[in-house]
Image (tube, coloured by chain):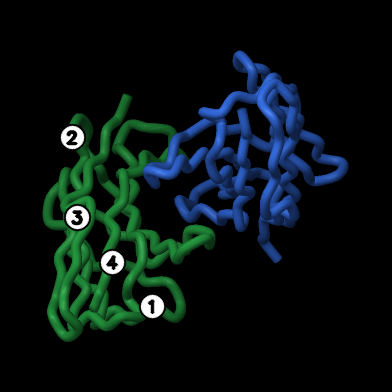
Chain colours: A blue, B green
Amino acid sequence: AQKVTQAQTEISVVEKEDVTLDCVYETRDTTYYLFWYKQPPSGELVFLIRRNSFDEQNEISGRYSWNFQKSTSSFNFTITASQVVDSAVYFCALTFYNTDKLIFGTGTRLQVFP
Amino acid sequence: GAVVSQHPSWVICKSGTSVKIECRSLDFQATTMFWYRQFPKQSLMLMATSNEGSKATYEQGVEKDKFLINHASLTLSTLTVTSAHPEDSSFYICSARGRQGNYNEQFFGPGTRLTVL
């Protein structure tokens, strides 16, 4: 089965807290790609990161960091020192080599309160 | 970066009418375009994939006669919801992949919110 699970449906934090959004995926393919997207209230999907299955190096971009662990099939996303503008729904997605079909998780709604 | 637009951004129509939604790639040629549907507080579900000049490929459970997709040029795809009913009310999002982009890189439009009364 090919599937993306985001077990956290909703998370609420207070500004400046760190928060980690979990993503667990299932696939038997050896070549695949993982994504994170942000969907603010306006609805437009904002691309955050793309990672291929051969690159397990963790990545940091400003306050955002990603932890890719093939051993646990997880691709978790951490926001450090969260801000109100981080409030959005965050989707993890999976796709494969030679296909365009994106499989989305159910999303995690993050609310950051001032 | 690559920009994808959708028009209209929102539409309200009466039950039984047809609604056309346009998806345009503004600064690149989109060889493949995708249409997604998102119900409130739910995830995005792929409806169909269209390649320029050929018929769209629909996902299982999506009625191709109800959701007509046309990808007549490298910068435009349209989704027509025919004989719309209230259960078709949803957020429709398109995405596009360019000829020269990374194979798995899709650029998303801002979405169209359809409300059928």
User: The residue marked by circle 1 belongs to what chain?
Assistant: B
User: The residue marked by circle 2 belongs to what chain?
Assistant: B
* Residue B58: image location, x then y, percent: 37, 71
Which comes sooner in the sequence, label 3 or label 1? 1
* Residue A58: image location, x then y, percent: 74, 23
Q: Is residue A52 visible?
A: yes
Real-space CA distance between mark 4 and mark 3, rounded to the nearest whole angstrom: 10 Å
Q: Residues within 10 Å of mark 3 (few under 14, many from 20)?
A: many
| Residue labelled with disc 3 | B77
Secondary element at image label 4: loop
Which mark identifies residue B62? 1
Which comes sooner in the sequence, label 2 or label 4? 2
Q: Residues within 10 Å of mark 4 (few under 14, many from 20)?
A: many
| Residue labelled with disc 2 | B26
User: The residue marked by circle 4 belongs to what chain?
Assistant: B
Task: Determine the residue located farthest toward the front in the rendered image.
Answer: A114
Question: Do callouts 2 and 1 point to residues on the same chain?
Answer: yes
* Residue A78: image location, x then y, percent: 71, 29
> Mark 3 near mark 2, Cβ–Cβ under 8 Å?
no
> Mark 3 near mark 1, Cβ–Cβ under 8 Å?
no
